[in-house]
Image (spheres, rainbow, N blue to C red):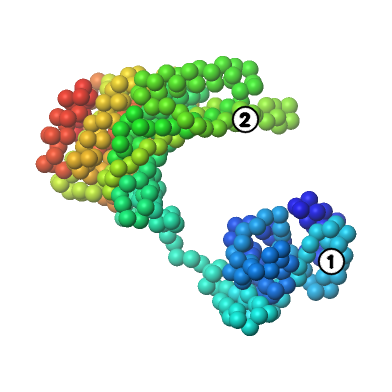
């Protein structure tokens, strides 16, 4: 069907200056209700839905108007070219329906039926095609419990996405991603381990049933056929499998694109090898999600830093290195998976106790980026004092080692720090 239609369109285009097509729009999302009103903007038009050729004559105006069928185009042509278009379509055995009359009324196309039981709808184009109010709500289904935007300014910084399974319960699902392609340029195995770690330090801010219930989708993009890239892909895959076994999670699906290279003239351009880990798990209480925006400005809130690799401040593959057009030498890594497991479990217990008011991961941009994003999202400022005499400011602030920053109340500070330290983790205010 689409081939026949394309041949008819091509016949029109090949007429050159006598091309009868004034405008063309592919049929798809939104159906006729989208494509036809956009074609007629801003003039306005009348649509005669009884002129559609229907395989099923019982279709209602609503079904004709909103059906998102494919392999069709809508064309805007002049009346004098209708006979030519009809002859071309007849030759190519492609159906054509003349259903629009552009009338300059500046109104929305009016569905019209020959039966008297159907009342036409008359809408101004401005109502449906005018400037919509600015918003970032993506909760189309009404089941999205946590979208990407957080805080009073709707800043797109959420670490984890949460959906509800029904309109009457608080049970749902949580999902998050991890990807570290720049670090993978230095060390493919470390990049894969960091992708797993980042996915979990993002997912941790939604309450899930258990770490062992977490499943993953692994999406690979690699120029695997080029020299050395196949070996790098193998190293990354082995590292991912090993670290997942130690953490206690597993991949149950995914996809791959292993021809991520193209020849431009005499040069071969390849995309960086990339692994995207998408983790997901059952969420027993969607209301227990923690977001990055600070909620206790002034003296009421305290920030805590929990590093997964305490004492390590490697800058390889960091955003800071990229700013200087460098990759660096030593990349962050998930040195001890059990430390990450402990961090995940303690954080989940604290979320269940409602002890955390905000939280954010560190591994994208470093500690300074994490803190600033939390402040931006909360629309407030920060008063931060760093005390680390043996580490330079650049290393401390811009290293993208795995870790999390938490906001807690002053009353809960000691209890929270005590729980992390009891699990063998470092936690500093």
Vertical side of 101 occupied by 247: above or below: above
Q: Position of residue 116 (x, y in %)?
A: 63, 83
Q: Which of 275 and 262 lies nearest the eye of the viewer?
A: 275
- Give the vertical position of 358 relative to 80 (above or below): above
In the image, 212 versus 78, the foreground residue is: 212
* Near-viewer residue (161 or 182): 161
Name the residue at 51% across, 67% down: 131
- Quarter where residue 122 is shown: bottom right
- State the image coordinates of residue 20 (x, y, percent, origin top left): 81, 65
Left or right of residue 366: residue 43: right
When asked about the image quadrant of residue 392, the answer is: top left
Mark 1 neighbour density, 10 Å: few (under 14) some (14–19) many (20 or more): some
| CA distance separating discs 2 and 1 | 44 Å
Instruction: Indicate left or right for 227 with 191 as reference.
Output: right
**What residue is drawn where x is 84% and y is 73%?**
80
Q: Residue tagged by mark 2?
A: 260
> Is residue 393 left or right of 255 when viewed as pictured?
left
């Amino acid at each position: 069907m689409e081939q026949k239609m394309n041949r008819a369109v091509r016949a029109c285009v090949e007429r050159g200056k006598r091309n009868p097509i004034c405008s063309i729009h592919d049929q798809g999302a939104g159906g006729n209700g989208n494509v036809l009103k956009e074609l007629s903007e801003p003039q306005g038009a009348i649509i005669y839905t009884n002129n559609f050729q229907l395989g099923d004559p019982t279709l209602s105006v609503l079904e004709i108007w909103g059906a998102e069928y494919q392999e069709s185009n809508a064309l805007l042509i002049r009346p004098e070219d209708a006979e030519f278009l009809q002859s071309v379509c007849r030759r190519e055995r492609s159906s054509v329906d003349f259903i629009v009359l552009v009338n300059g009324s500046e109104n929305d196309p009016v569905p019209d039926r020959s039966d008297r039981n159907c009342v036409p709808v008359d809408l101004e184009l401005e109502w449906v095609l005018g400037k919509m109010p600015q918003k970032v709500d993506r909760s189309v289904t009404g089941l999205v419990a946590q979208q990407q935007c957080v805080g009073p300014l709707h800043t797109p910084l959420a670490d984890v996405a949460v959906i509800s399974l029904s309109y009457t319960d608080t049970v749902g699902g949580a999902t998050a991603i991890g990807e570290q392609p720049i670090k993978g340029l230095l060390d493919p195995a470390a990049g894969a381990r960091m992708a797993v770690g980042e996915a979990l330090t993002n997912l941790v801010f939604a309450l899930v049933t258990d770490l062992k219930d977490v499943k993953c989708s692994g999406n690979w993009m690699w120029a695997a056929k080029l020299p050395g890239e196949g070996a790098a892909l193998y190293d990354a895959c082995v590292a991912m499998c090993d670290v997942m076994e130690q953490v206690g999670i597993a991949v149950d699906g995914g996809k791959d694109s292993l021809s991520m290279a193209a020849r431009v003239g005499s040069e071969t351009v390849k995309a960086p090898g990339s692994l995207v880990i998408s983790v997901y798990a059952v969420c027993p209480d969607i209301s227990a999600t923690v977001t990055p925006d600070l909620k206790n400005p002034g003296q009421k809130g305290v920030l805590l830093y929990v590093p997964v690799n305490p004492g390590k401040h490697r800058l390889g593959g960091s955003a800071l290195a990229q700013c200087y057009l460098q990759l660096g030498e030593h990349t962050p890594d998930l040195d001890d998976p059990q430390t990450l497991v402990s961090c995940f479990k303690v954080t989940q217990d604290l979320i269940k106790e409602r002890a955390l008011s905000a939280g954010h991961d560190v591994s994208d941009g470093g500690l300074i980026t994490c803190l600033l994003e939390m402040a931006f999202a909360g629309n407030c400022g920060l008063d931060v004092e760093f005390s680390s005499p043996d580490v330079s400011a650049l290393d401390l602030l811009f290293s993208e080692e795995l870790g999390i920053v938490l906001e807690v109340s002053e009353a809960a500070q000691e209890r929270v720090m005590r729980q992390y330290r009891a699990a063998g983790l470092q936690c500093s205010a």
